Image (cartoon, rainbow, N blue to C red):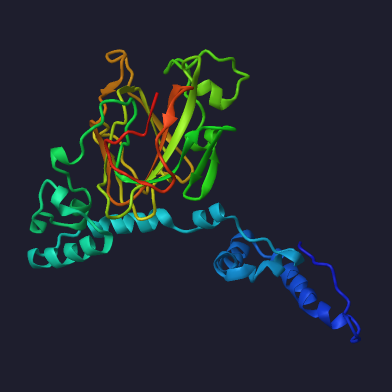
């Protein structure tokens, strides 16, 4: 049983009348605290939105009487993003009449600054639905791959953040800083993958480094709606394991496709939120995994998204980037 402390009414004399708003808010918050958790969350959600949207901290006085806004992450998680993404994905699959394709795509091109001269197929009537238009391929010569550096940009986009991984954190992915372990999930057992032989007591970050003298680096690339939506291998490597987090993916991304992984089905209602599933490409018949060459096609998004590239490199690796700059697939991220 929930019970709030009773409050005596203040006397009406100088100075006490200022307490009325706070007393009323405290009484109201006491009533809110008696609500069930779903009901309380529902009532707090609109206030939280106003708290972050209104200028000059208009609702900050509420925090002085005990109310606390939901965190931005909790607020985002409370939105039915997976349902919205699936609905948007299905909408993108609707075939447009031939006469409607050019005006619809032309409006999109004008709005988001799409350069159709780079597209392998420039004829707008070729794309039957919005999904095909988003996933359009480019002419081979449109994105030359830099051969002088070991790591290239896997996609077109905008550089949001980059640098050496510090304090076991991945910084500013859609405005949120994640711990490396919560972002990647628990380590895969050593029987499946040969990680570094670092002692078990070392940090999660140190245990991910496979070679002495190397460090972990990260680069966050945002793909806008008008960008080329395929992504490619950033270097020569071998894919040994895949971990799929069903809740990961930008809002309104109907699906993410990985070309060599036909068993991966993203944004499916059968997945429970917060779970993940692993798949190993190493078996008795294939102990090397899947080889990928720098610049090779890796996958595609059905709408704009974000790529978080985490990689290992020697300590003298230097990024040649600036926050906020535009980059294209094939351009160098840095050098040794």
Give residue 317's quadrant in the image.
Answer: top left
Q: Name the residue: 47% across, 15% down.
A: 211
Residue for point 25% across, 25% down: 293
Residue, x 54% and y 26% (percent of image)? Answer: 205
Residue 126 vs 141, above or below: the answer is: below
- The residue located at (59%, 61%) in the rendering is 38
Q: How many marks?
A: 0
**Residue 19: horizontal and vertical position, in percent?**
83, 77
Is 129 on the left or on the right of 264, as rendered?
left
Q: Quadrant of residue 151?
A: top left
- The quarter of the picture where the C terminus appears is top left
Which of these two is toward me, 150 or 35? 150
Rendered-image quadrant of the N terminus: bottom right
**In this image, 176 relative to 21: left or right?**
left
Q: Is residue 332 above or below residue 7?
A: above
Residue 51, horizontal then vertical, whole percent? 60, 66
Q: In screen coordinates, is 333 left or right of 111?
A: right
| Horizontal arrangement in the rendering, residue 224 relative to residue 195 (left or right) | left
Q: Nearer the viewer, residue 158 or 274?
A: 158
Any part of residue 34 in sight: no
Above or below: residue 270 compared with residue 309: below
Q: Quadrant of residue 71?
A: bottom right
Task: Say above or below: 88 vs 154.
Answer: below
Q: Position of residue 320 (x, y in %)?
A: 39, 35
Question: What is the x, y in percent for residue 169?
Answer: 55, 36
The answer to whether residue 70 is seen in the rendering is: yes
């Amino acid at each position: 049983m929930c019970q709030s402390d009773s409050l005596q009414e203040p006397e009406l004399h100088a100075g006490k009348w200022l307490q009325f708003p706070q007393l009323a808010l405290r009484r109201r918050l006491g009533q809110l605290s008696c609500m069930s958790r779903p009901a309380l969350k529902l009532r707090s959600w609109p206030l939280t939105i106003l708290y972050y949207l209104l200028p000059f901290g208009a609702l900050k006085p509420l925090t002085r009487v005990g109310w606390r806004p939901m965190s931005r992450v909790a607020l985002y998680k409370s939105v039915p993003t997976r349902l919205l993404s699936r609905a948007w994905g299905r909408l993108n699959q609707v075939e447009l009449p031939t006469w409607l394709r050019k005006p619809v795509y032309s409006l999109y091109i004008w709005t988001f600054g799409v350069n159709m001269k780079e597209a392998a197929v420039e004829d707008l009537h070729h794309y039957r639905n919005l999904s095909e238009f988003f996933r359009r391929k480019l002419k081979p010569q449109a994105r030359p791959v830099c051969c002088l550096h070991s790591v290239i940009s896997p996609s077109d986009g905008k550089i949001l953040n980059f640098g050496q991984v510090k304090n076991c954190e991945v910084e500013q992915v859609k405005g949120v800083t994640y711990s490396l372990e919560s972002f990647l999930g628990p380590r895969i057992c050593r029987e499946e993958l040969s990680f570094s032989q670092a002692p078990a007591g070392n940090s999660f970050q140190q245990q991910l480094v496979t070679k002495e003298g190397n460090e972990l680096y990260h680069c966050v690339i945002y793909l806008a709606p008008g960008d080329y939506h395929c992504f490619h291998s950033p270097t020569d490597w071998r894919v040994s394991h895949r971990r799929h987090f069903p809740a990961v993916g930008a809002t309104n991304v109907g699906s993410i496709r990985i070309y060599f992984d036909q068993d991966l089905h993203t944004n499916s209602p059968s997945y429970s939120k917060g779970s993940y599933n692993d798949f190993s490409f190493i078996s008795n018949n294939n102990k090397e995994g899947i080889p990928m060459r720098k610049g090779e096609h890796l996958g595609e998004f059905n709408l704009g998204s974000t790529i978080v590239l985490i990689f290992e490199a020697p300590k003298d690796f230097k990024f040649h980037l600036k926050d906020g700059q535009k980059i294209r697939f094939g351009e160098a991220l840095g050098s040794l």
